Amino acid sequence: MEFLYYFGDVFTPINFGLLMLGTIGGLILGATPGLSPTMAVALLIPFTFQLEAAQGLILLGAAYTSTVAGGAVSAILLKIPGAPANIATTLDGHTMAQKGEGAKALQLSFLASAVGGVFGVLLLIFLTPVLAKWALAFGPSHLFWLAILGVTVIGTLDSRSVVKGLLSGCIGLWLSTIGFDDIMGAQRFIFHPALGGGINIIAALIGLFAIPQVITMFAKGRRNDGAEVIEVQKHSILDAMKELMRNKRAMGIGTITGSIIGLIPGVGGQIAGLVAYDQSKKFSPDRDKFGTGHPEGVIAAEAANNAMVGPSLVPLLTLSIPGSPTAAVLLGGLLIHGIFPGTDLFDNHPDVAWTFINSMLIGQILMCIFGLYVAGMAARVAQVPQSVMAAVVLGLAVFGSYSVQSSMGDVYVMAALGVMMYFLERFGFSAAPLVLGLILGPIAEANFIQGSMIARATDGLGPYFLTGPLNIFLIAVVILSILYSAYMELRTRRYTSKEEIMA
Amino acid sequence: MKQLLAGAAIALMGLTTTAFAEGAENYPERPVMMMVSYGAGGATDFQARIVTMTAGNEDALGMPIAILNKPGAGGRVGWNWLATQADADGYTLGAYNVPHFIAQSIKGGVEYSTDSFEPIANWGADPAVFVVGADSDFNSMQDVVAFAKENPGKLTFSGAGLFVGHHIAALQLEKAADVKMAYIPNNKGGAGAMKAVIAGEVMGGINNLSDAFRAEQAGNVKILGVFDLERNEFLPDVPTLKEQGYDIDNASVNFRGIMVPKGTPEDVIEKLAATVPAMFENGKVAGKMKAGGSPMKIMTRDEVKQMWADRAATLKELLAGL
């Protein structure tokens, strides 16, 4: 209960002001395509040089929390996920916005974010020692199976046809091999120096999601004189809360999946939303409605990606190992004040540690309040004519992909992938499985290579990858997931006509 | 285009020698940019931001230095950019990591070598150390080597990747102790390699002194030896590998400093080489670096030139067999 003692520190005028600043700034940064949470936090680090340790961390923690949630705004209204964490939000969120339910989707996403986020931080407060052991339990073989589990999801994610889903997943897996490989330094498919570092995930995200949108908008503009405007119906916050209460299952699955996955160093945030989305789809009686603007999809995805924030800091705060790029940046923020995460932090600087954690708790709630206010204004944003919107989105896309690593190469990659995706979408492929392939490829590959190097030096490939309770459990889940997909595919195929499959 | 500009610059230099001398006197007239070939928040980025924070002071450059991150492929993307695309006008600096960029250029597939850059000054030296989990049976390097002798190729130990300081240290250890061990490069850098040690995925590991120091403070690892010529001020009780009887020098020490692309005007280089080491010596910089557990080692341009040449020779020999 030590954390309660330090709650007062959050509400001193300067600290609370910084918390507000971080939250509002984070929402704006998060809503800007290309500015991922990691970037936003890194941008703020120099400002914390001048602040005290606790104050600096409050600013960084608030920014981290709210950029993750802010990514939902562009995901829902523009179909551009601000960061990999928000990919799953686009699937139902943007379709809701197209149906005129943009405000409702935003309200649901911020409410779900707050619930998931508060749960995640509470886990961080009460279960840190237990969770730290968990985080370490995942070695290369387990991460490999986890990535394979992700691959089994690819086929059924946001596609009418499993074959097309798998095919676009494979394109993603191939794209992920471009560049110097992470472990051996071998060069693969580098035809231009801009590809040396591989395909940057943020640039790819922007291209794959935003560019087809832009092209479609321009194409429509020619036909309809740009008069078509997304309608946004007003939606009361109370109704959104009631809606959230009706969808306890999606809420629960999202929160729990997000917390567990967020904990695993190196995988966490990027896939939490997608896995939670897929799980709640499988457990839902309305699974056919997913992808057509179903609130459950938004709730599960956003609950998961904010639930991941708290647990993702466990390895950093207890073991001094940054588990995610954002955590690595936060580590810098601590070191600059001479504070070492680990026992030193909690024993010698409890005021810093607990003020930081408490401020994340308050930050989640502030984020929700400001987010709901933003949702109210979304109506005005969406009243922009499509031709203007297309230009704005294109500008943001170029800006966003350039700013990731100050490289024009990323802009070319973004544009090339975007144009490719426009044509793929015409043939019924979708972007989400492709991005999932792009994310999972390196995780599966690097962990397989590392695992097999360790295995060859010790007990051999078979025992290393196939024995041990956690390996067997993960393999069982992989097999179940494949069987389930096959079963669903066969069952629905009986009822679908040839024409529908062709479509 | 660049050549054209360079040509024009040379022509101008010839025509207006006095005017240009004054130009160098006034350098820098606008903020200077420094390219860091690792991501924001990494150790190199973190240190680069600290050591350049006083650049705007009157006694330093008088102009701020802005950090530009160009991460990717273990630093290759950024250094390729600096060697081939950056303007050699003194307004584009770069951070170097030795032995990384030298080892990469020996291994091939990149567009730079030590001849592509001109060193300015060195700010930090982070030696590699050998770490084992806190509950490991190994208590000295002798224990580690004895195990490796009995079980050739079975002792797994992690490091940040191939052709980085940790890998060099691993090669040196195998050579000096005449053992075969299983080096497991990690795709998540030093942090990932450290996690592998703490989680018990591997039996030991080579890691940065600064990160290992933190992990030891947190009670997660034991540090068995330092791959350097002398003991480190952060770890006065940990013996060097040499003290423990292995003939290993400081070739794996991760040196960090500032360089400029080749072709930068000579007087600009001289001005930088004269002011930058003094800038690193600023008390505020030293305080922040020490607080963050980052060992400093300030070296002048001539010392760095010598260090680069020595390193290139050692690495060529070590990597020849790979």
Image (cartoon, coloured by chain):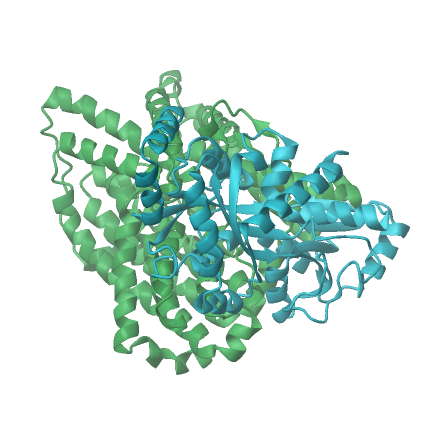
The part of the image, by quadrant, that contains residue A321 is bottom right
Residue at x 60% of width, y 56% of height:
B125
Q: How many numbered dots are placed on residues in this image?
A: 0
Residue at x 15% of width, y 37% of height:
A230
**Residue B80 shows in the view:** yes
Q: Using the image as rendered, state which of residue A366 and residue B302 is in the foreground.
A: B302
Image coordinates of residue A149 in percent, x first then y, are 55, 41
Residue at x 32% of width, y 43% of height:
B23
Q: Using the image as rendered, state which of residue B13 and residue A405 is in the foreground.
A: B13
The chain that appears green in the image is A
Image coordinates of residue B221 in percent, x first then y, are 68, 65
**Residue A256 shows in the view:** no
- The residue sitting at the front extreme is B18
The chain that appears cyan in the image is B
Residue at x 18% of width, y 41% of height:
A100
Relative to A204, does residue A192 appear above or below in the rendering? above
Relative to A42, does residue A95 appear above or below in the rendering? above
Image coordinates of residue B238 in percent, x first then y, are 73, 67
Image coordinates of residue A12 in percent, x first then y, are 28, 78
In-image side of A122 versus A104 (left or right): right
Relative to A370, does residue A193 appear above or below in the rendering? above
In-image side of B152 versus A257 (left or right): right
Q: Using the image as rendered, state which of residue A467 and residue A294 is in the foreground.
A: A467
Q: Using the image as rendered, state which of residue B85 and residue A214 is in the foreground.
A: B85
The part of the image, by quadrant, that contains residue B230 is bottom right
In-image side of A233 versus B42 (left or right): left
